[in-house]
């Protein structure tokens, strides 16, 4: 679900091509996001999870998959090892 939320955000808000995500070697830096874009993308997750992700400046150096794993680990850490159900609908 987390992956789909991020992909939907990038496709619908940042006009990224869905085909980009078919590449298993995709790096976050390949997405062409500036620092504000990164902050906005992470706010989308943080709003749904109810906490701030630690050190988001490291994500551009990661692969897209590594970023997803890292964010999921942070969510689980914040929720006693559980991954809560995250809605695909944007938070208000």
Image (tube, rainbow, N blue to C red):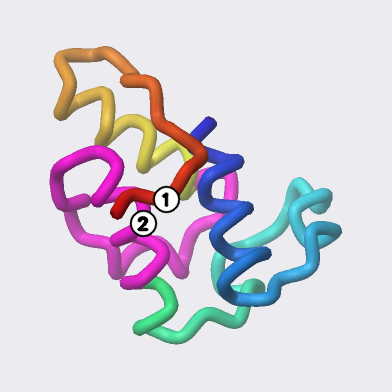
Q: Is residue 50 magenta?
A: yes
Name the quadrant of the C terminus: bottom left
In terms of secondary structure, where does tag 1 sit? loop
Q: Position of residue 16 (x, y in %)?
A: 70, 71
Q: Earlier in the sequence, mark 1 or mark 2?
A: 2
Q: Nearer the viewer, residue 78 or 30?
A: 78
Q: Residues within 10 Å of mark 2 (few under 14, many from 20)?
A: some
Question: Main SS type for the magenta part?
Answer: helix
* Residue at screen point 46% across, 69% down: 60
Q: Nearer the viewer, residue 1 or 59?
A: 1
Q: Quadrant of residue 80?
A: top left
Can you identify the residue that label 1 sits on? 90
Seen in the picture, residue 78 relative to 64 is either above or below; the reply is above
Q: Position of residue 79 (x, y in %)?
A: 17, 21
Can you identify the residue that label 2 sits on? 44
Range of residues picked out in magenta:
39-66
Q: Quadrant of residue 49?
A: top left
Kindly check if marks 1 and 2 are in contact, taking CB atoms under 8 A apart as contact. Answer: yes
Q: Position of residue 12 (x, y in %)?
A: 63, 66
């Amino acid at each position: 679900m987390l992956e789909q939320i991020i992909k939907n955000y990038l496709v619908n808000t940042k006009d990224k091509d869905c085909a980009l995500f078919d590449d298993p070697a995709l790096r976050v830096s390949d997405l062409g996001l500036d620092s504000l874009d990164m902050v906005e993308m992470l706010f989308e997750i943080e709003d749904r999870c109810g906490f701030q992700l630690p050190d988001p400046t490291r994500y551009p150096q990661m692969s897209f998959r590594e970023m997803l794993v890292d964010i999921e680990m942070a969510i689980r850490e914040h929720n006693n090892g559980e991954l809560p159900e995250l809605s695909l609908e944007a938070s208000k």
